Image (spheres, rainbow, N blue to C red):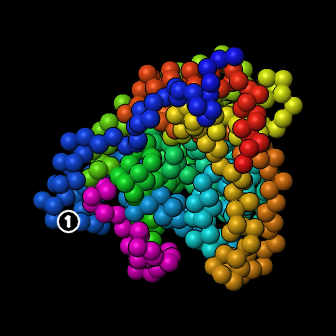
Amino acid sequence: MGSALAIDGGTAVVPSGTVRTWPEFTDSDRAAVLRVFANNQLHTNAAPFAQELQAKWAEYCGVKHCLVTNGGTGALHIALAAAGVRAGDEVITSAYSYWATAASILHQNAIPVFADVDPQTTTIDPARIEEMITDQTTAILPVDIHGVPADMDAVRAVAQKHGLLVVSDCCQAHGAAYKGQRVGGLADISGFSLNRSKNLTGGEGGLVTTSSDEHQRRCEAILRFQNVEDDEGTVAFSGLGFNYRPHEFVNALALSQLERLPTLNERRKEMAGYLTQSLTELAGVAGPRVPEYADPVYFSYLWEARPDELGLDVPAGTLRKGLCRALAAEGVPARPAQPRPVPGEGVFQAKLGYGRGCPWRCHAREVTYRVEDYPSTLKVCTSRAFLGGVYPPNDLNLMTHYVEAFAKVLGQIDRVLELAEEE
């Protein structure tokens, strides 16, 4: 029997205070933010840092246009509105995502329809999209979850077959690539978040990308409380405007961070690659599966509990619970990932929407949200867990301690299973 687990009084593998937080800030970041005061322009897309960020992010993603917003959910909402999604329309999205993805659909008074995921990649399963399409479907909203791009060729093939637009949620995938092309330029319109946790951060904020001049005009109209007019001055497009204007402090910080994004992403990949390879040598756990088409950027590192590899007749969720408890005591920030499919969230179960049942009741749609209809998503939710700290300023030295901690707790699996049963 190995040394005592930390949860039982043994010495933790990772000393307290070792794991550092994201993001790391530099003097260049601080200087960039201070320059906002010198410019004396604090907001709007006409401000200098907003203009520069829009131009550089468009170039980075390989698109014609970028619009800075004040948040990722707002960016997705603007994108959906610009794509022509109307009140009562249906938008098909992934059952596995942060539920703000589906909230952006509700903000357009449209109805989210969920498709199950590929249990290996955890991205939307293109084979499940087509069966969800109805006469009311307007768009498909795939999600590049945890930094892994969705299978966009397959998604776009379904969309083209049925005359649908694709609006991509890239909020967790800054710099990720699909078959060599960066996300942000793979859909008709895409949305990114600049939240504090993201690979590219401004603290908050968002980005909308597109190569369509018409979609760009519509995005700008929504953000600025304006209409799109034709050459005769007739209103050609209008929508409910929102205060989605960006702030220059956010833009300045994001621009400074963008200079280091490729380097920081490579450091994430290095740590993730080391972990995944090391976990293959330990029965009972596995790192994320990377599809051949993808070059992910590991916004989150997702590992899987595999009791069958240990000859255990217990649910994956039981093993995961015990491992997370034991690892946390060892100083490893491990915790269950998404607890349920998005359609299992309270807002979709109650279908209260805006308080009186809209958009469902307002548009007489009979849409049901049963979590058992998403078996692959349920499998992901019960077997996967996050591993924190797999990002700079942490390094490979910390990752070696993580692997040591996994080996330690897996070496005392009976005690791990006891921990899973304790309250």
Query: Which residue occupies 45% across, 74% down?
Result: 242
Q: Is residue 174 above or below residue 309?
A: below
**Is residue 280 part of the magenta span, yes or no?**
no
Residue extent of the magenta highlight: 223-251
Tell me if 217 is positioned left or right of 156 in this view.
left
Tell me if 1 is positioned left or right of 366 in this view.
left
Tell me if 421 is positioned left or right of 285 in this view.
right
Foreground of the two, 327 or 240: 327
Q: If the image is split into quadrants, where does the N terminus sit?
A: top right
Q: Position of residue 52 (x, y in %)?
A: 27, 51
Foreground of the two, 133 or 394: 394
**Secondary structure type for disc 1:** loop
Amino acid type indicated by mark 1: Gln
Dominant secondary-structure state across the stretch colored magenta: loop
Query: Which residue occupies 60% across, 48% down?
Result: 143
- Quadrant for residue 205, please give it: bottom left
Q: Position of residue 327 (x, y in %)?
A: 60, 33
Foreground of the two, 207 or 353: 353
